[in-house]
Amino acid sequence: GNSVTQMEGPVTLSEEAFLTINCTYTATGYPSLFWYVQYPGEGLQLLLKATKADDKGSNKGFEATYRKETTSFHLEKGSVQVSDSAVYFCALSGSGTASKLTFGTGTRLQVTL
Amino acid sequence: NAGVTQTPKFQVLKTGQSMTLQCAQDMNHEYMSWYRQDPGMGLRLIHYSVGAGITDQGEVPNGYNVSRSTTEDFPLRLLSAAPSQTSVYFCASSSPSGGHTGELFFGEGSRLTVL
C-alpha cells in the first residue's frame, strides 16, 4: 500500500535560516504529491503540490521537487520567518483517488527570533 | 466564504455515549471525507464519499458510521464512544478535477474527548 515517511520534529530554526523537511514515499503507479500546512488551532491547508515526476511545486517561498528516482518530495525554504511556525504534512494521492490522501506523521517547525 | 464547516468544535463524552459530528460544505464538491489526527500518527482516513448516496470505508472505519444524503452534508456518527476515539477529527472536501490532483479543503477540526 501507499505510505509517506517524514523526518521527525520538532525542527527549531532561527529566523532567516534555511529549511529542509525530508519526505519520502512508497506508492504504486504515479501518485500526486502534496505539502499541507497546519497553523495552530486551524485545519490543514494546501501549501504546494506536484503531479508528475520532475515537477516543482512552489508557494509562499516554499518549494518541493517530485523526484521519482529517489521517491522523495523534500520541502525547502531559503529564509524562514516566525510566521512559518506550523506543522507540515507530506501527503500523496494515488491514481483515481482524489478524495483519499495518505499523510505522513507531520513535522513541527518552530522559528525563533 | 464558509468553505467546510464542522460542529461542534469541542465535545466531551462518556464511554458508551453516542454523538454525531456535523460537516457541511458550500463549494458543491463531490468528494467528502473524514480524517482523525492523533499525535505521532498524522491523519488517518475514516470514511469517504464520492457523491450523494455513496460512501466507503477508509483506513480506520471501526466504530464510526457515515451517510451522504446530500452533496453538502457528511455527518460522522459514533454509536458507542470509546476512549480510543479521543482525537481531533477533520472533515475535508474536494472536487475531482484532473483525476487524482484534487486539492482537499479542510474544516477547522472537532476535538473529541471520551472519558
Image (tube, coloured by chain):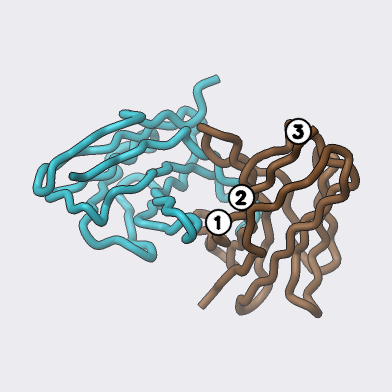
Between the residue at mark 3 and the residue at mark 2, the CA separation in whole angstroms equals 30 Å
- In terms of image quadrants, where is residue A17? top right
Between the residue at mark 1 and the residue at mark 2, the CA separation in whole angstroms equals 5 Å
Left or right relative to B98: residue B71: left
> Under tag 1, what secondary structure?
loop
Determine whether label 1 and label 3 are within 8 Å by CB: no
- If you read the primary sequence from the N terminus, does the residue marked by circle 1 or circle 3 appear first? 3
Q: Chain of mark 1?
A: A
Counting from the top left corner in percent of width and height, residue B12 is at 22, 35
Counting from the top left corner in percent of width and height, residue A97 is at 53, 62
Q: Chain of mark 3?
A: A
Label 2 Cα crowd, 10 Å radius (few <14 / some 14-19 / many 20+) = many
Kindly identify the residue that appears in the image at 69 percent across and 71 percent down.
A24
- In terms of image quadrants, where is residue B14? top left
The residue that disc 2 covers is B102
Which tint is chain A? brown
Kind of residue at disc 3: Val
The residue that disc 1 covers is A98
Counting from the top left corner in percent of width and height, residue B108 is at 47, 33
Counting from the top left corner in percent of width and height, residue A20 is at 80, 57
Which tint is chain B? cyan
The residue that disc 3 covers is A82
Kind of residue at disc 2: Gly
Against A89, residue B88 (above or below) is above
Nearer to us of marks 3 and 2 is: 3
Q: How many marks?
A: 3
Kind of residue at disc 1: Ala
